[in-house]
Image (cartoon, rainbow, N blue to C red):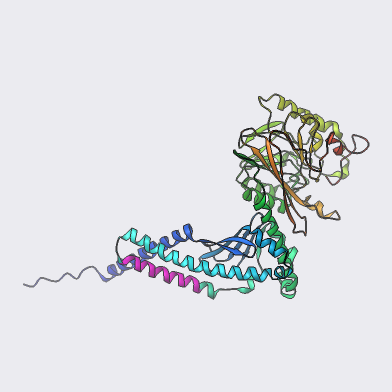
Amino acid sequence: MIEPTDPGPPRWERSARVAGRWTLRVAVALVGALLAVLLFGRISAPIGPFDASLAFRPAGGNATVAVPPLGSITVDVYDGPLRLDVALQRVDQERAEALANDPVRLAGVVTEVSEDLQSAVVRLVWTTAGLAVLGAAVTSLVVTRRRKEPLIAAGVTTVLLLGTAGLGAATWRPEALSQPTYSGLLANATSLIGSAEDIVTRFDAYRASLEDIVGNVGTLYATLSSLPAPSGGGDTVVLLHVSDLHLNPSGFDLVRQVVDQFGVDGVLDTGDITDWGSGPENRLITSVGTLGVPYVFIRGNHDSAVTAGLVAAQPNTTVLDASTVTVAGIEIAGIPDPRFTPDKSTGDDDAGVDVLEESGEELADVVEDLPEPPAIAMVHDPRQAQPLDGLVDVVLAGHTHDRKVSELDDGTLLMVQGSTGGAGLRALQGEYPEPLTCTVLYLDAETGRLQAYDEITLGGLGETEVMIQRHTLPTGEQQESTGGTEDGALDEYLPPGDASAPASPAE
């Protein structure tokens, strides 16, 4: 008798097995390719005067150029699963100086940058493709342990890469290059270089503006790379002093960019984060809780109790009210401005110097009751600082919108910040735009003594100038600041005439 032959599994089951096998192959190849690209798929290349890094990252297409601490530029130039990330890291001082000293080269800087970028992207494409194929093959060999599988994985990855390249080429939109999206401080770039329509008709002006931006960013990076170390050795705590943001979004962007670029351990805000302390203004305040570092705040005369409460409700924030807090091992004391006078026209700012000095004395009592004096005291108005002279090494203040560093009679360093928000909308009232200012403080982690500080200044509305200046203090003693006052440093903050006269309307 002839035994019936086994027909084997049904056709649908065989098809399902084949489909499952190929799905697994594609998944393994894709995972291996992505891991290799994410771990090793970044190259360094010179782009004009800059040293930059380039990489493809999983995302929905587009190209992004990061310019820390100024922000980033995104161009929706193609579609696909990979985004091109370009990050300007530093400026080559020799190339920057050669560019600045050669008018012919400066006139062609945009062409030079474009050619360098194109060359770097081509090298990145080949590097990424090679890493993806190699990563897929190695991962397939490790997972399956079959000799033929790495070849299949390499073939699958090659097909995926060709498909990605084809999608990018099919959706290439060169017109998008004239319509970039700006973030951070570069969000105001359209006001500097004109709209997309203007760019088309005024390319020469657009080119000149790009040269200005490239030159200024080059200056910024040259300054950063040439700054001396803040100390000769030991651990350093980095704190950022800001004040008088006055709800300027560019000011908040500046804070975020400096926190990231300088590795800041905490932000110290000496008040006037708002203009009127009203509910609608408070929406922007929530961004302080997303900085990723401690944020210490005292109320200014423009900040309401509601504003202070909203700041205190954000993650990782502290509002000081005749109290202290420790940030990265550095103890900080602070007290708010005793006044709430958002409307200068009402005449309610005539409380005078007495009430300010009384609040300073209240904080001095807190300091004297501590086992060890804090490293820093925070007040809003410099006239609150007098009672703290000799009790703390450094007093931070704001209010005047005029940056000044001076030594008080008993050796305390008074550091008055300008306006990190460029005076907010008040910048539109004056003849010249207020610059955006902040200061990076470097303190000895063990002793809490101030070792050095960087004064950062960005031009106000319509300006592109960036300046960073480092001041180093001698070890063991305070340095007398250039341009500061000597004895009786607080005299300049007293209003002329009657001691109870109101402060300047610009404050």
* Residue in the picture at 72% in, 73% down: 203
* Residue in the picture at 33% in, 58% down: 143
* Residue in the picture at 69% in, 53% down: 223
**Residue 495 shows up from this direction:** yes
* Residue in the picture at 64% in, 65% down: 48
Q: Residue 378, relative to residue 289: is it above or below?
A: above
Quadrant placement of the C terminus: top right
Question: Does the magenta run of residues contain 153?
Answer: yes
Q: As drawn, is 173 to the left or to the right of 435?
A: left
Q: As drawn, is 99 to the left or to the right of 20?
A: right
Question: Does the magenta run of residues contain 460?
Answer: no
- Location of residue 452 (image quadrant): top right
Q: Which residues are magenta?
A: 148-166
Quadrant placement of the N terminus: bottom left
Magenta stretch mostly in which secondary structure? helix
Q: Residue 301, relative to residue 7: is it above or below?
A: above
Q: Position of residue 415 (x, y in %)?
A: 76, 40
**Camera-nearest residue between 55 and 91:** 91
Q: Residue 393, relative to residue 21: is it above or below?
A: above
- Location of residue 499 (image quadrant): top right
Q: Position of residue 372 (x, y in %)?
A: 66, 26
